[in-house]
Amino acid sequence: MPAFYTIDRERELVLSSGSGILTQEDVSNHMERLSTDPDFDPNFSQVLDFTNVTAVEIRPDDIRRLAERNIFSSHSRRAFVVKDDLHFGLARMYEIYRELHGEMGIRVFRNFDDAMNWILAGEAAP
């Protein structure tokens, strides 16, 4: 899956997006590239736009393993934007696993504008 990100230092925001088939390896590689970017700050917020993902080849165990590693602060706001019920469920699964690790600032949206409004609300996650 082609995965991209842009770091907006002024808004303290990472915009991530992908298209095509999403795999566990794609997500892990994206996290690795982002975490080593000199402009990345773990306190930034993130919007992950998955609306152009056509298929997901990630099992529930993969999601659990991905959720065990976090490159963002537990106070960062992170919003997933998805287009269908399957992707919504998988993103919610990730959200729940992260909540079990004490991270309460992840939400799943079906609309990019709603996600951005929530991210830019300016309030720190609980």
Image (tube, rainbow, N blue to C red):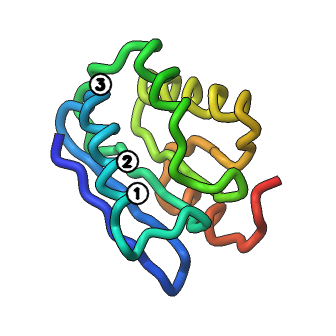
Task: Indicate the amino acid at tag 3.
Answer: Val
Q: Would you say 26 lies left or right of 49 here?
A: left
Disc with the residue nearer the chain's start (1 vs 3): 1
Are the residues at dot 1 and dot 3 in contact (C-beta closer than 8 Å)?
no
Residue in the image at 29% along x and 24% along y: 56
Task: Indicate the amino acid at tag 2.
Answer: Met
Q: Secondary structure at mark 1?
A: helix
Disc 2 versus disc 3: nearer the observer: 2
Q: Which residue is mark 2?
A: 31
Q: Would you say 34 lies left or right of 4 here?
A: right
Give the numbered dot on residue 35: 1
Q: Secondary structure at mark 3?
A: strand
**Residue 122 x/y as whole percent:** 72, 73
Which of the 4 quarters of the picture holds residue 109?
Answer: top right
**Which quarter of the rendering shows the N terminus?**
top left
- Separation of residues labelled 2 and 3 (CA atoms): 17 Å
Residue in the image at 51% along x and 69% along y: 41
Are the residues at dot 1 and dot 2 in contact (C-beta closer than 8 Å)?
yes
- Separation of residues labelled 1 and 3 (CA atoms): 23 Å
Give the numbered dot on residue 56: 3
Disc with the residue nearer the chain's start (2 vs 3): 2
Q: Is residue 1 above or below residue 71?
A: above
In this view, the residue farthest toward the bottom is 10
Badge 3 crowding class, 10 Å Cα cut-off, few under 14, some 14 to 19, many 20 or more, is some
Badge 2 crowding class, 10 Å Cα cut-off, few under 14, some 14 to 19, many 20 or more, is some
Report the front residue among 62 and 69.
Answer: 69
Q: Would you say 97 lies left or right of 75 here?
A: left
Task: Indicate the amino acid at tag 1.
Answer: Ser
Q: Secondary structure at mark 2?
A: helix
**Residue 38 x/y as whole percent:** 37, 73
Residue in the image at 76% along x and 57% along y: 125
Q: Is residue 17 above or below residue 45?
A: above
